[in-house]
Image: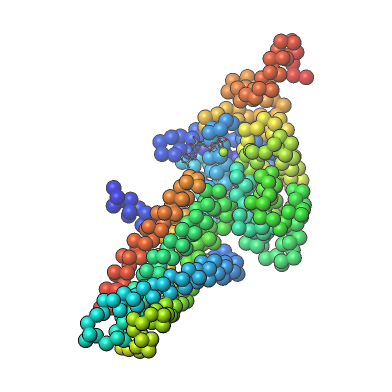
Amino acid sequence: MIEVKNLVKSFDDKTVLHDVSAKFETGKTNLIIGQSGSGKTVMLKCLVGLLRPDSGEILFDGRNTLDFSHEQMKELRKEIGMLFQGSALFDSETVLDNVMFPLVMFTDMSRSEMLDRAMFCLERVNLRGAEKKYPSEISGGMQKRVAIARAIALNPKYLFCDEPNSGLDPKTSILIDELLSDITHEYNITTVINTHDMNSVLGIGENIIFINKGYREWVGDMSQIYTTGNEALNDFVFATRLFSELREYVASHGHIDKK
Amino acid sequence: MLLTDSIANFGRFCSFLGRVFAWPDKFSISFKRVINEISKLGVDSIPLVIIISVFMGAVCTIQMQLNVTSPLMPAYSVGLATRDIVLLEFSNSILCLILAGKVGSSIVSEIGTMRVTEQIDALEIMGVNSANYLVMPKIVGFVMFMPVLDIICMGTSFVGGYLVTVFTDLIPSSRYIYGLQAMFQEWYVWYGLIKSVVFAFIIVSVSSFYGYFVKGGALQVGKASTNGVVVSSIFILLFDVILTKLLLQ
Ligand SMILES: Nc1ncnc2c1ncn2[C@@H]1O[C@H](COP(=O)(O)OP(=O)(O)OP(=O)(O)O)[C@@H](O)[C@H]1O
Ligand SMILES: [Mg+2]
């Protein structure tokens, strides 16, 4: 479990995160949701240590990473997999080499063992056959899947995903979401996903943290999200035309209760 | 303001170099990358070096012949002067200024693109020392290969001058060759090699620094690329003065 307590982060004189506290549970898909610019990426970067918060605590299974020495942080990072907003694949290396990279850097496996593991991960994300291609030669959705394969290559205990389905069509988004959810449950990983996609929220939101303008506004799961009285969250949830029309339809036909 | 900025930048540059020259995470990988960079930065520059050296050698010879008009000066002094110019300045300072454009800009754009597409963050997340992993092989590879480029440059410049003497009747080829060998000072070659190695270090470290700390997008990578080349050129000229003072006097 990852626990965040009273996190504050500001850039120059602009405070991006105000006193945010949250819990991310093991074996569940934890979602951070919020509008563009609300501070989701900054929050995630603080969690993984790419940014240093001004104050607060970040506890990975009880260990406060902000007190970690350089060596301890390095050890922790071998347990972390991360999926970046833009995939961040190494574009001078093939898909296979990308997935093998963490294995080559951090294990003493033989070449054939690495190959097996990399092929296993690629198979897990349904990408067998693309291993010889370069990242520029495959589609955005495939790049995301390669990035997932690379992130799980070392069997991480913690998986962080920044907008795993931005720029993807709804169907591919669902595939990626299901993949992340399956991996989380299969290997009992603590998964934290940033998203502003309501589809993902309703599909895989087991533990949802809503951030608005840098404040943590609401915590809950996908079954509670319609019935919340929180105004900012309602605005966010019903921002898509389909949802708001549905809500009006339901309201005018008198079926207020959701089912 | 400019002064404090420069001092702050110099401090950042030093701590950057500290991270670059940390012990590699895995030695075998860094070794492979060094070989790779020798081929990418060094061997791939050989054609450019040969082309410019032939022309510059030829131009030097013609210029010398035009300027050495006094009947008291022997014809071989053209060869001698060409040789000394090539050894003292052309094969190191001028060559490195040109390579700063080719090698420097390619390094800034490669590392800068990795920065803006979060590839460097991805390395850091995995626990890799990205500065060491990306930059150290470039510095080691290029610095090691620089003497080879330097020697190629010297040799082909002399050939360029020789071709002028063969295809024109400015001076007899035999006089030119005699001039190349006359009053030869071995130290000049060492002086040139030392300078070129220092310049190679400047080119790679400065341009890596500019690439590594890019903020923004493709536009900023382009700007950083220009800055990297300009700043490395200025430092090459500055160290040219310092090293000449130290080594030749
Ligand atoms: N390195 C930085 N320096 C200064 N300000 C920053 C920096 N990174 C983020 N910010 C600011 O922090 C705020 C939150 O940004 P963040 O990237 O976390 O948003 P986000 O919720 O991830 O949005 P999106 O959904 O568009 O990715 C923004 O207003 C941004 O300008
Ligand atoms: Mg973001």
- Quadrant in the picture for residue B186: bottom left
- Quadrant in the picture for residue B187: bottom left
Give the colouring mode of the picture.
Answer: rainbow
Q: Image height check: is A245 above or below A34?
A: above
Q: Residue lying at the far front in this picture: please name it.
A: B169
Name which residue lies at 41% across and 80% down. B167
Residue A153 spot, x, y in % from top left: 69, 54
Residue B59 spot, x, y in % from top left: 36, 73
Query: A92 or B139, which is in the foreground?
Result: A92
Residue B58 in sight here: yes
| Residue B106 appears left or right of A126 | left
Name which residue lies at 57% across and 54% down. B123
- Quadrant in the picture for residue A140: top right
Question: How many numbered marks, from 0 up?
Answer: 0
Q: Image height check: is B22 above or below A158?
A: below
| Residue A29 appears left or right of B103 | right
Q: The N terminus of chain A lies in which quarter of the figure?
A: top right
| Residue A56 appears left or right of B73 | right
Residue B37 in sight here: no
Name which residue lies at 41% across and 83% down. B166
Residue B37 spot, x, y in % from top left: 54, 67
Name which residue lies at 60% across and 45% down. A86
Q: The C terminus of chain A lies in which quarter of the figure?
A: top right
